Image: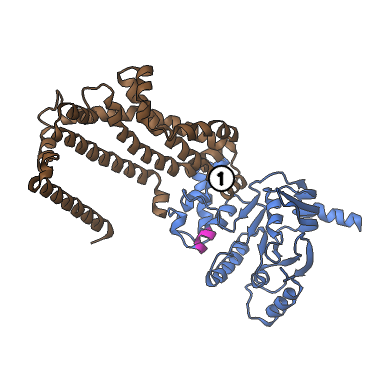
Chain colours: A brown, B blue
Amino acid sequence: MNGTKRRVAYGMLGIFIFLCIWHAAATLTNLGRIMPDPVTVFVRFFMAFIEPIGTKTMLFHILTSLRRMLIPYTLGGLAGVFMGVLMGWYRICDAAFMPYIQMLRPIPPIAWIPLSIVWFGFAEGSKYFLIFLACFFTIALTTCDGVHSVDETLVRAARMLGARDRQLFTTIVLPTTVPYIFSGLQVALGSAWATIVAAEMIRSSEGVGWLIVSGQDVGNMTQIMVGIVAIALTGLLITSMMRGVEARLCAWTIRGK
Amino acid sequence: MRMDNKRKINESLIAFHGVSKTFDKPGEGRYEVVRDLYLNVQENEFLVLFGPGQCGKSTILNMIAGFEAPSGGELLCQGRPVEGPGPERGMVFQNTALFPWLTVMGNVEYGPKVRGVKKEERRKQAQHYIDLVGLQGFENSYPVKLSGGMQQRVGIARAYCSEPLVMLLDEPFGHLDAQTRYLMQDELTRIWQVEKRTVIFVTNNIEEAVYLADRILVLRNCPTGVKAEYQITLPRPRNYTDPEFLRLRREIDAVVDHTL
Protein backbone atom coordinates (compact mmCIF):
# COMPACT_ATOMS: atom_id res chain seq x y z
CA MET A 1 0.00 0.00 0.00
CA ASN A 2 1.52 3.32 -0.97
CA GLY A 3 1.58 6.53 1.10
CA THR A 4 -1.42 8.23 -0.46
CA LYS A 5 -3.68 5.21 -0.17
CA ARG A 6 -2.64 4.72 3.44
CA ARG A 7 -3.44 8.38 4.18
CA VAL A 8 -6.89 8.07 2.66
CA ALA A 9 -7.52 4.80 4.53
CA TYR A 10 -6.57 6.35 7.87
CA GLY A 11 -8.71 9.40 7.09
CA MET A 12 -11.74 7.22 6.35
CA LEU A 13 -11.15 5.18 9.48
CA GLY A 14 -10.98 8.37 11.56
CA ILE A 15 -14.26 9.61 10.13
CA PHE A 16 -15.91 6.25 10.70
CA ILE A 17 -14.83 6.12 14.34
CA PHE A 18 -16.03 9.69 14.86
CA LEU A 19 -19.44 8.86 13.37
CA CYS A 20 -19.71 5.76 15.58
CA ILE A 21 -19.00 7.80 18.72
CA TRP A 22 -21.49 10.44 17.61
CA HIS A 23 -24.12 7.83 16.91
CA ALA A 24 -23.58 6.08 20.21
CA ALA A 25 -23.69 9.35 22.12
CA ALA A 26 -26.88 10.49 20.39
CA THR A 27 -28.81 7.22 20.71
CA LEU A 28 -27.54 5.76 23.98
CA THR A 29 -27.33 8.86 26.17
CA ASN A 30 -29.33 11.97 26.97
CA LEU A 31 -27.28 13.94 24.42
CA GLY A 32 -29.82 12.71 21.84
CA ARG A 33 -32.18 15.47 23.00
CA ILE A 34 -29.88 18.24 21.86
CA MET A 35 -28.26 16.49 18.93
CA PRO A 36 -29.72 14.30 16.17
CA ASP A 37 -27.79 11.13 15.40
CA PRO A 38 -25.68 10.95 12.22
CA VAL A 39 -27.88 8.42 10.44
CA THR A 40 -30.89 10.74 10.67
CA VAL A 41 -28.78 13.71 9.51
CA PHE A 42 -27.28 11.96 6.51
CA VAL A 43 -30.57 10.35 5.48
CA ARG A 44 -32.21 13.78 5.61
CA PHE A 45 -29.28 15.27 3.72
CA PHE A 46 -29.48 12.80 0.85
CA MET A 47 -33.29 12.80 0.88
CA ALA A 48 -33.13 16.57 0.41
CA PHE A 49 -31.82 16.03 -3.12
CA ILE A 50 -35.29 14.68 -3.99
CA GLU A 51 -37.53 16.12 -1.30
CA PRO A 52 -37.22 19.92 -0.98
CA ILE A 53 -36.30 21.74 2.22
CA GLY A 54 -38.29 24.97 2.16
CA THR A 55 -39.25 25.23 -1.49
CA LYS A 56 -36.02 23.97 -3.05
CA THR A 57 -34.05 20.73 -3.23
CA MET A 58 -30.53 20.33 -1.86
CA LEU A 59 -28.81 20.66 -5.23
CA PHE A 60 -30.51 24.01 -5.77
CA HIS A 61 -29.45 25.21 -2.30
CA ILE A 62 -25.84 24.22 -2.94
CA LEU A 63 -25.71 25.72 -6.43
CA THR A 64 -27.29 28.97 -5.24
CA SER A 65 -24.69 29.32 -2.50
CA LEU A 66 -21.89 28.40 -4.89
CA ARG A 67 -23.01 31.09 -7.31
CA ARG A 68 -23.24 33.59 -4.47
CA MET A 69 -19.71 32.72 -3.48
CA LEU A 70 -18.04 32.36 -6.87
CA ILE A 71 -19.06 35.73 -8.33
CA PRO A 72 -17.57 37.87 -5.54
CA TYR A 73 -14.71 35.37 -5.14
CA THR A 74 -13.73 35.85 -8.76
CA LEU A 75 -14.00 39.64 -8.46
CA GLY A 76 -12.10 39.62 -5.16
CA GLY A 77 -9.45 37.37 -6.69
CA LEU A 78 -8.92 39.61 -9.72
CA ALA A 79 -8.91 42.78 -7.63
CA GLY A 80 -6.63 41.15 -5.04
CA VAL A 81 -4.10 39.98 -7.61
CA PHE A 82 -4.13 43.39 -9.27
CA MET A 83 -3.67 45.16 -5.95
CA GLY A 84 -0.99 42.71 -4.83
CA VAL A 85 1.04 43.14 -8.01
CA LEU A 86 0.76 46.93 -7.73
CA MET A 87 1.96 46.86 -4.13
CA GLY A 88 4.68 44.34 -4.84
CA TRP A 89 6.04 46.09 -7.93
CA TYR A 90 5.73 49.75 -6.93
CA ARG A 91 7.14 50.71 -3.57
CA ILE A 92 4.90 53.77 -3.41
CA CYS A 93 1.74 51.66 -3.76
CA ASP A 94 2.99 49.43 -0.97
CA ALA A 95 3.52 52.46 1.27
CA ALA A 96 0.15 53.95 0.38
CA PHE A 97 -2.13 50.90 0.56
CA MET A 98 -0.52 48.49 3.01
CA PRO A 99 -1.76 50.32 6.14
CA TYR A 100 -5.37 50.08 4.95
CA ILE A 101 -5.06 46.43 4.12
CA GLN A 102 -3.46 45.64 7.45
CA MET A 103 -6.19 47.60 9.27
CA LEU A 104 -9.18 46.25 7.37
CA ARG A 105 -8.09 42.64 7.05
CA PRO A 106 -8.59 41.59 10.71
CA ILE A 107 -12.21 42.86 10.74
CA PRO A 108 -14.41 39.74 10.41
CA PRO A 109 -16.80 39.93 7.42
CA ILE A 110 -19.76 39.53 9.78
CA ALA A 111 -18.97 42.94 11.29
CA TRP A 112 -19.81 44.54 7.93
CA ILE A 113 -23.34 43.11 7.77
CA PRO A 114 -25.22 46.20 9.04
CA LEU A 115 -23.26 48.57 6.81
CA SER A 116 -23.47 46.33 3.78
CA ILE A 117 -27.29 46.21 4.13
CA VAL A 118 -27.39 50.01 4.21
CA TRP A 119 -25.05 50.28 1.24
CA PHE A 120 -26.19 47.42 -0.96
CA GLY A 121 -29.67 46.51 0.28
CA PHE A 122 -31.06 43.11 1.25
CA ALA A 123 -30.59 41.49 -2.15
CA GLU A 124 -27.50 39.81 -3.57
CA GLY A 125 -25.30 42.94 -3.50
CA SER A 126 -24.70 42.92 0.24
CA LYS A 127 -23.88 39.17 0.18
CA TYR A 128 -21.39 39.70 -2.63
CA PHE A 129 -19.82 42.52 -0.67
CA LEU A 130 -19.21 40.36 2.42
CA ILE A 131 -17.67 37.54 0.44
CA PHE A 132 -15.58 39.94 -1.62
CA LEU A 133 -14.12 41.28 1.64
CA ALA A 134 -13.46 37.74 2.85
CA CYS A 135 -11.12 37.03 -0.08
CA PHE A 136 -9.74 40.33 -1.36
CA PHE A 137 -7.27 41.10 1.45
CA THR A 138 -5.80 37.62 1.72
CA ILE A 139 -5.20 37.40 -2.03
CA ALA A 140 -3.74 40.91 -2.21
CA LEU A 141 -1.28 40.16 0.61
CA THR A 142 -0.10 36.78 -0.67
CA THR A 143 0.30 38.15 -4.21
CA CYS A 144 2.34 41.05 -2.85
CA ASP A 145 4.53 38.60 -0.91
CA GLY A 146 4.99 36.63 -4.11
CA VAL A 147 6.21 39.64 -6.07
CA HIS A 148 8.58 40.54 -3.22
CA SER A 149 9.99 37.02 -3.18
CA VAL A 150 11.40 37.31 -6.72
CA ASP A 151 14.99 36.08 -6.65
CA GLU A 152 17.43 38.86 -7.58
CA THR A 153 19.86 36.42 -9.25
CA LEU A 154 17.09 35.15 -11.52
CA VAL A 155 16.38 38.74 -12.55
CA ARG A 156 20.09 39.16 -13.28
CA ALA A 157 20.17 35.94 -15.27
CA ALA A 158 17.16 37.04 -17.32
CA ARG A 159 18.62 40.47 -18.03
CA MET A 160 21.96 38.90 -18.95
CA LEU A 161 20.11 36.73 -21.48
CA GLY A 162 18.53 39.82 -23.02
CA ALA A 163 15.10 40.13 -21.34
CA ARG A 164 13.53 43.60 -21.39
CA ASP A 165 11.42 45.02 -18.54
CA ARG A 166 8.09 43.73 -19.82
CA GLN A 167 9.61 40.29 -20.41
CA LEU A 168 11.11 40.31 -16.91
CA PHE A 169 7.60 40.76 -15.59
CA THR A 170 5.96 38.01 -17.64
CA THR A 171 8.79 35.47 -17.54
CA ILE A 172 10.24 35.95 -14.05
CA VAL A 173 7.93 37.92 -11.75
CA LEU A 174 4.69 36.23 -12.78
CA PRO A 175 5.90 32.61 -12.58
CA THR A 176 7.46 33.33 -9.17
CA THR A 177 4.18 34.80 -7.98
CA VAL A 178 1.78 32.14 -9.30
CA PRO A 179 2.28 29.67 -6.42
CA TYR A 180 1.74 32.51 -3.94
CA ILE A 181 -1.43 33.59 -5.74
CA PHE A 182 -2.64 30.00 -5.56
CA SER A 183 -2.00 29.67 -1.86
CA GLY A 184 -3.91 32.94 -1.43
CA LEU A 185 -6.76 31.67 -3.62
CA GLN A 186 -6.84 28.45 -1.64
CA VAL A 187 -7.09 30.18 1.75
CA ALA A 188 -9.54 32.74 0.36
CA LEU A 189 -11.75 30.02 -1.07
CA GLY A 190 -12.06 28.56 2.42
CA SER A 191 -12.91 31.91 4.00
CA ALA A 192 -15.31 32.86 1.21
CA TRP A 193 -17.21 29.61 1.61
CA ALA A 194 -17.20 30.00 5.40
CA THR A 195 -18.67 33.49 5.01
CA ILE A 196 -21.64 32.14 3.06
CA VAL A 197 -23.57 31.47 6.29
CA ALA A 198 -23.02 35.04 7.46
CA ALA A 199 -24.01 36.35 4.04
CA GLU A 200 -27.19 34.30 3.97
CA MET A 201 -28.16 35.55 7.41
CA ILE A 202 -29.03 38.71 5.52
CA ARG A 203 -32.48 37.96 4.17
CA SER A 204 -32.50 34.91 1.87
CA SER A 205 -34.88 32.09 1.04
CA GLU A 206 -32.43 29.49 -0.24
CA GLY A 207 -28.81 28.40 0.07
CA VAL A 208 -26.83 26.25 2.49
CA GLY A 209 -26.47 29.12 4.96
CA TRP A 210 -30.22 29.68 4.81
CA LEU A 211 -30.75 26.02 5.83
CA ILE A 212 -29.01 26.77 9.10
CA VAL A 213 -30.63 30.14 9.69
CA SER A 214 -34.13 28.87 8.96
CA GLY A 215 -33.45 25.68 10.94
CA GLN A 216 -32.69 27.90 13.90
CA ASP A 217 -35.88 29.94 13.34
CA VAL A 218 -38.14 26.88 13.39
CA GLY A 219 -36.07 24.98 15.95
CA ASN A 220 -35.30 22.12 13.55
CA MET A 221 -32.05 20.59 14.80
CA THR A 222 -31.79 18.11 11.94
CA GLN A 223 -32.08 20.85 9.34
CA ILE A 224 -29.25 22.82 11.04
CA MET A 225 -27.05 19.73 10.96
CA VAL A 226 -27.99 19.06 7.33
CA GLY A 227 -26.91 22.62 6.50
CA ILE A 228 -23.58 22.07 8.27
CA VAL A 229 -23.02 18.80 6.42
CA ALA A 230 -23.84 20.50 3.09
CA ILE A 231 -21.30 23.26 3.79
CA ALA A 232 -18.64 20.79 4.91
CA LEU A 233 -18.98 18.41 1.96
CA THR A 234 -19.21 21.17 -0.65
CA GLY A 235 -16.22 22.93 0.95
CA LEU A 236 -14.22 19.71 0.77
CA LEU A 237 -15.19 19.26 -2.88
CA ILE A 238 -14.28 22.77 -4.04
CA THR A 239 -10.96 22.96 -2.16
CA SER A 240 -9.94 19.57 -3.61
CA MET A 241 -10.82 20.80 -7.08
CA MET A 242 -8.73 23.90 -6.43
CA ARG A 243 -5.76 21.70 -5.38
CA GLY A 244 -6.12 19.78 -8.61
CA VAL A 245 -5.93 22.96 -10.67
CA GLU A 246 -2.93 24.15 -8.64
CA ALA A 247 -1.12 20.86 -9.12
CA ARG A 248 -1.48 21.25 -12.87
CA LEU A 249 -0.49 24.90 -13.09
CA CYS A 250 2.35 24.88 -10.58
CA ALA A 251 3.82 21.51 -11.45
CA TRP A 252 7.35 22.67 -10.78
CA THR A 253 6.70 23.71 -7.15
CA ILE A 254 4.55 20.70 -6.36
CA ARG A 255 7.19 18.35 -7.77
CA GLY A 256 9.86 20.26 -5.92
CA LYS A 257 8.21 19.66 -2.57
CA MET B 1 55.52 52.26 -23.62
CA ARG B 2 52.42 54.35 -23.09
CA MET B 3 51.36 53.95 -26.72
CA ASP B 4 52.00 50.27 -26.53
CA ASN B 5 49.80 49.95 -23.47
CA LYS B 6 47.00 51.86 -25.15
CA ARG B 7 47.09 49.64 -28.21
CA LYS B 8 47.00 46.53 -26.11
CA ILE B 9 43.82 47.76 -24.41
CA ASN B 10 42.10 48.43 -27.70
CA GLU B 11 42.93 44.99 -28.99
CA SER B 12 41.72 43.12 -25.92
CA LEU B 13 38.22 41.75 -25.70
CA ILE B 14 37.82 42.98 -22.14
CA ALA B 15 39.94 45.74 -20.69
CA PHE B 16 40.01 47.17 -17.18
CA HIS B 17 41.75 50.50 -17.14
CA GLY B 18 42.34 51.71 -13.58
CA VAL B 19 38.97 50.41 -12.41
CA SER B 20 37.90 50.82 -8.82
CA LYS B 21 34.73 49.83 -7.01
CA THR B 22 33.47 51.02 -3.65
CA PHE B 23 30.19 50.12 -1.98
CA ASP B 24 28.33 52.48 0.32
CA LYS B 25 26.81 50.32 2.97
CA PRO B 26 24.31 52.20 5.13
CA GLY B 27 25.63 52.33 8.69
CA GLU B 28 28.97 50.78 7.77
CA GLY B 29 30.40 53.53 5.63
CA ARG B 30 32.36 53.12 2.42
CA TYR B 31 33.87 49.79 1.57
CA GLU B 32 36.51 49.60 -1.11
CA VAL B 33 36.46 46.27 -2.94
CA VAL B 34 38.51 46.89 -6.08
CA ARG B 35 41.32 49.45 -6.36
CA ASP B 36 43.05 50.61 -9.51
CA LEU B 37 42.66 47.39 -11.47
CA TYR B 38 44.39 46.92 -14.84
CA LEU B 39 43.45 43.78 -16.68
CA ASN B 40 43.29 42.63 -20.29
CA VAL B 41 41.53 39.57 -21.55
CA GLN B 42 42.46 38.23 -24.98
CA GLU B 43 40.16 36.43 -27.36
CA ASN B 44 39.65 32.70 -26.74
CA GLU B 45 41.83 32.59 -23.67
CA PHE B 46 40.87 30.73 -20.53
CA LEU B 47 41.55 33.20 -17.76
CA VAL B 48 41.24 32.21 -14.11
CA LEU B 49 40.87 34.82 -11.40
CA PHE B 50 42.20 33.17 -8.30
CA GLY B 51 42.16 34.64 -4.83
CA PRO B 52 41.07 34.16 -1.23
CA GLY B 53 37.37 34.13 -0.33
CA GLN B 54 35.55 37.46 -0.23
CA CYS B 55 38.43 39.23 -1.98
CA GLY B 56 36.27 40.88 -4.63
CA LYS B 57 36.61 38.31 -7.45
CA SER B 58 32.87 38.15 -7.94
CA THR B 59 32.65 41.93 -8.00
CA ILE B 60 35.07 41.99 -10.93
CA LEU B 61 32.90 39.46 -12.74
CA ASN B 62 29.71 41.34 -11.90
CA MET B 63 31.20 44.49 -13.39
CA ILE B 64 32.05 42.70 -16.64
CA ALA B 65 28.55 41.23 -16.70
CA GLY B 66 27.17 44.74 -16.23
CA PHE B 67 25.34 43.96 -12.99
CA GLU B 68 27.45 46.51 -11.17
CA ALA B 69 29.00 49.70 -12.51
CA PRO B 70 32.61 50.65 -11.74
CA SER B 71 33.03 53.57 -9.31
CA GLY B 72 36.05 54.81 -11.18
CA GLY B 73 38.24 54.06 -14.19
CA GLU B 74 37.24 52.54 -17.49
CA LEU B 75 35.87 49.09 -18.29
CA LEU B 76 35.71 48.25 -21.98
CA CYS B 77 34.28 45.32 -23.89
CA GLN B 78 35.49 45.28 -27.51
CA GLY B 79 36.62 48.85 -27.02
CA ARG B 80 33.20 50.10 -25.88
CA PRO B 81 32.26 50.91 -22.28
CA VAL B 82 30.15 48.24 -20.56
CA GLU B 83 26.66 49.55 -19.89
CA GLY B 84 24.38 47.03 -18.23
CA PRO B 85 24.05 43.29 -18.83
CA GLY B 86 23.82 41.78 -22.31
CA PRO B 87 23.87 38.42 -24.06
CA GLU B 88 27.39 38.94 -25.44
CA ARG B 89 28.62 38.44 -21.87
CA GLY B 90 27.20 35.16 -20.60
CA MET B 91 27.29 34.40 -16.90
CA VAL B 92 27.24 31.00 -15.21
CA PHE B 93 26.15 31.61 -11.63
CA GLN B 94 27.49 29.98 -8.51
CA ASN B 95 23.98 29.01 -7.36
CA THR B 96 23.05 28.06 -10.98
CA ALA B 97 20.19 30.66 -11.07
CA LEU B 98 18.16 28.34 -13.30
CA PHE B 99 14.50 29.22 -13.78
CA PRO B 100 12.80 26.51 -11.71
CA TRP B 101 9.49 26.77 -13.58
CA LEU B 102 11.12 26.02 -16.92
CA THR B 103 12.38 22.68 -18.16
CA VAL B 104 15.99 22.16 -19.27
CA MET B 105 14.94 23.08 -22.80
CA GLY B 106 13.00 26.09 -21.52
CA ASN B 107 16.04 27.33 -19.63
CA VAL B 108 18.50 26.87 -22.47
CA GLU B 109 16.25 28.46 -25.11
CA TYR B 110 15.27 31.37 -22.81
CA GLY B 111 17.91 33.72 -24.22
CA PRO B 112 17.06 33.32 -27.92
CA LYS B 113 13.35 33.31 -27.01
CA VAL B 114 13.33 36.71 -25.28
CA ARG B 115 15.43 38.07 -28.13
CA GLY B 116 12.73 36.99 -30.58
CA VAL B 117 14.42 34.05 -32.33
CA LYS B 118 11.83 31.83 -34.07
CA LYS B 119 10.84 28.65 -32.27
CA GLU B 120 12.22 26.20 -34.82
CA GLU B 121 15.57 27.92 -35.02
CA ARG B 122 16.04 28.41 -31.28
CA ARG B 123 15.02 24.81 -30.54
CA LYS B 124 17.73 23.60 -32.91
CA GLN B 125 20.24 25.94 -31.33
CA ALA B 126 19.29 24.93 -27.77
CA GLN B 127 19.37 21.24 -28.66
CA HIS B 128 22.90 21.67 -29.97
CA TYR B 129 24.10 23.06 -26.63
CA ILE B 130 22.11 20.55 -24.59
CA ASP B 131 23.89 17.81 -26.55
CA LEU B 132 27.21 19.60 -26.11
CA VAL B 133 26.96 19.57 -22.31
CA GLY B 134 25.77 15.95 -22.37
CA LEU B 135 22.17 16.40 -21.26
CA GLN B 136 20.35 14.75 -24.16
CA GLY B 137 17.29 12.93 -22.82
CA PHE B 138 16.75 15.48 -20.05
CA GLU B 139 15.22 18.24 -22.22
CA ASN B 140 11.86 18.00 -20.48
CA SER B 141 13.13 17.61 -16.92
CA TYR B 142 12.71 20.39 -14.39
CA PRO B 143 15.88 21.63 -12.66
CA VAL B 144 14.80 20.34 -9.22
CA LYS B 145 14.91 16.82 -10.66
CA LEU B 146 18.58 17.15 -11.64
CA SER B 147 21.74 16.68 -9.57
CA GLY B 148 23.97 19.66 -8.77
CA GLY B 149 26.43 18.82 -11.54
CA MET B 150 23.66 18.42 -14.11
CA GLN B 151 22.08 21.70 -13.04
CA GLN B 152 25.36 23.48 -13.66
CA ARG B 153 25.59 21.83 -17.09
CA VAL B 154 22.23 23.47 -17.85
CA GLY B 155 23.68 26.77 -16.62
CA ILE B 156 26.63 26.39 -19.00
CA ALA B 157 24.39 25.43 -21.93
CA ARG B 158 22.09 28.37 -21.20
CA ALA B 159 24.97 30.85 -21.25
CA TYR B 160 26.50 29.23 -24.36
CA CYS B 161 23.19 29.32 -26.22
CA SER B 162 23.35 33.10 -26.49
CA GLU B 163 26.67 32.64 -28.30
CA PRO B 164 28.46 35.14 -26.07
CA LEU B 165 31.85 36.68 -26.76
CA VAL B 166 32.90 35.90 -23.25
CA MET B 167 31.74 33.36 -20.69
CA LEU B 168 31.84 34.46 -17.06
CA LEU B 169 31.91 31.63 -14.55
CA ASP B 170 31.53 32.60 -10.91
CA GLU B 171 32.79 29.68 -8.81
CA PRO B 172 30.40 27.46 -10.76
CA PHE B 173 31.53 24.22 -9.12
CA GLY B 174 31.83 25.65 -5.60
CA HIS B 175 28.75 23.82 -4.31
CA LEU B 176 29.58 20.44 -5.84
CA ASP B 177 31.11 17.47 -4.07
CA ALA B 178 34.77 16.74 -4.89
CA GLN B 179 34.10 13.86 -7.30
CA THR B 180 31.53 15.80 -9.34
CA ARG B 181 33.81 18.79 -9.30
CA TYR B 182 36.66 16.87 -10.98
CA LEU B 183 34.21 15.53 -13.54
CA MET B 184 32.83 18.98 -14.30
CA GLN B 185 36.34 20.42 -14.67
CA ASP B 186 37.01 17.76 -17.31
CA GLU B 187 33.71 18.47 -18.97
CA LEU B 188 34.29 22.21 -19.03
CA THR B 189 37.71 21.69 -20.62
CA ARG B 190 36.15 19.41 -23.23
CA ILE B 191 33.29 21.83 -23.98
CA TRP B 192 35.68 24.74 -24.20
CA GLN B 193 37.91 22.87 -26.63
CA VAL B 194 34.92 21.99 -28.83
CA GLU B 195 33.41 25.49 -28.80
CA LYS B 196 36.20 27.96 -28.12
CA ARG B 197 35.12 31.02 -26.21
CA THR B 198 36.85 33.55 -24.06
CA VAL B 199 36.34 32.33 -20.52
CA ILE B 200 36.83 34.20 -17.29
CA PHE B 201 36.60 31.74 -14.45
CA VAL B 202 36.57 32.76 -10.80
CA THR B 203 37.66 30.29 -8.15
CA ASN B 204 39.27 30.03 -4.74
CA ASN B 205 40.50 26.50 -5.43
CA ILE B 206 44.15 26.40 -6.54
CA GLU B 207 43.93 22.93 -8.05
CA GLU B 208 40.96 23.96 -10.17
CA ALA B 209 42.81 27.10 -11.26
CA VAL B 210 45.91 25.23 -12.47
CA TYR B 211 43.83 22.50 -14.08
CA LEU B 212 41.73 24.86 -16.20
CA ALA B 213 43.68 28.00 -16.95
CA ASP B 214 45.71 29.37 -19.84
CA ARG B 215 46.53 32.21 -17.53
CA ILE B 216 46.01 32.70 -13.81
CA LEU B 217 45.73 36.08 -12.14
CA VAL B 218 46.31 35.89 -8.41
CA LEU B 219 44.27 38.55 -6.66
CA ARG B 220 45.06 40.44 -3.52
CA ASN B 221 42.80 40.74 -0.50
CA CYS B 222 40.33 43.63 -0.41
CA PRO B 223 40.68 46.18 -1.93
CA THR B 224 41.70 43.79 -4.63
CA GLY B 225 44.04 44.09 -7.55
CA VAL B 226 46.35 41.79 -9.48
CA LYS B 227 49.13 40.41 -7.29
CA ALA B 228 50.78 37.97 -9.66
CA GLU B 229 50.29 36.50 -13.11
CA TYR B 230 51.07 32.98 -14.38
CA GLN B 231 50.89 31.52 -17.88
CA ILE B 232 50.02 27.84 -17.69
CA THR B 233 51.35 26.02 -20.73
CA LEU B 234 50.80 22.43 -19.57
CA PRO B 235 49.15 20.39 -22.33
CA ARG B 236 45.49 19.37 -21.91
CA PRO B 237 44.06 17.15 -20.59
CA ARG B 238 46.10 17.88 -17.51
CA ASN B 239 47.02 15.54 -14.73
CA TYR B 240 46.49 16.59 -11.13
CA THR B 241 49.48 14.55 -9.96
CA ASP B 242 51.92 15.51 -12.69
CA PRO B 243 55.14 16.85 -11.02
CA GLU B 244 55.03 20.07 -13.04
CA PHE B 245 51.37 20.53 -12.09
CA LEU B 246 52.20 20.09 -8.43
CA ARG B 247 55.17 22.45 -8.65
CA LEU B 248 53.01 25.19 -10.19
CA ARG B 249 50.36 24.59 -7.60
CA ARG B 250 52.88 25.01 -4.76
CA GLU B 251 54.45 28.05 -6.35
CA ILE B 252 51.15 29.88 -6.88
CA ASP B 253 49.75 28.89 -3.53
CA ALA B 254 52.79 30.45 -1.83
CA VAL B 255 51.90 33.83 -3.32
CA VAL B 256 48.32 33.83 -2.04
CA ASP B 257 47.46 35.88 0.98
CA HIS B 258 46.01 33.34 3.38
CA THR B 259 45.38 35.78 6.20
CA LEU B 260 41.73 36.48 6.88
Q: Is residue B124 left or right of residue B236?
A: left
Q: Which residue is mark 1?
A: B112
Q: Can residue B116 be seen in this snapshot?
A: no
Q: Residue B3 appears at what percent x and percent y? A: 90, 54
Query: Would you identify the image quadrant in which residue A104 lies?
Result: top left
Q: Residue B123 appears at what percent x and percent y? A: 49, 48
Crowding near the residue tagged with mark 1, few <14, some 14–19, many ≥20 C-alpha atoms within 10 Å: many
Query: Would you identify the image quadrant in which residue A190 lies?
Result: top left
Assign a secondary structure to mark 1. helix
Residue B150 within the magenta-colored segment of the rendering: yes
Q: Can residue A95 be seen in this snapshot?
A: yes
Q: Residue B80 appears at what percent x and percent y? A: 76, 46
Query: Would you identify the image quadrant in which residue A178 lies?
Result: top left
> In which quadrant is the C terminus of chain B drawn?
bottom right
Q: Residue B251 appears at what percent x and percent y? A: 75, 77
Q: Nearer the viewer, residue A211 or A27?
A: A27
Residue farthest to the front, as pictured:
A30
Answer above or below: position of A19 versus A6: above
Q: Chain of mark 1?
A: B
Residue A95 within the magenta-colored segment of the rendering: no
Q: Tell me the magenta residue range.
A: B148-153
Residue farthest to the bottom, as pictured:
B243
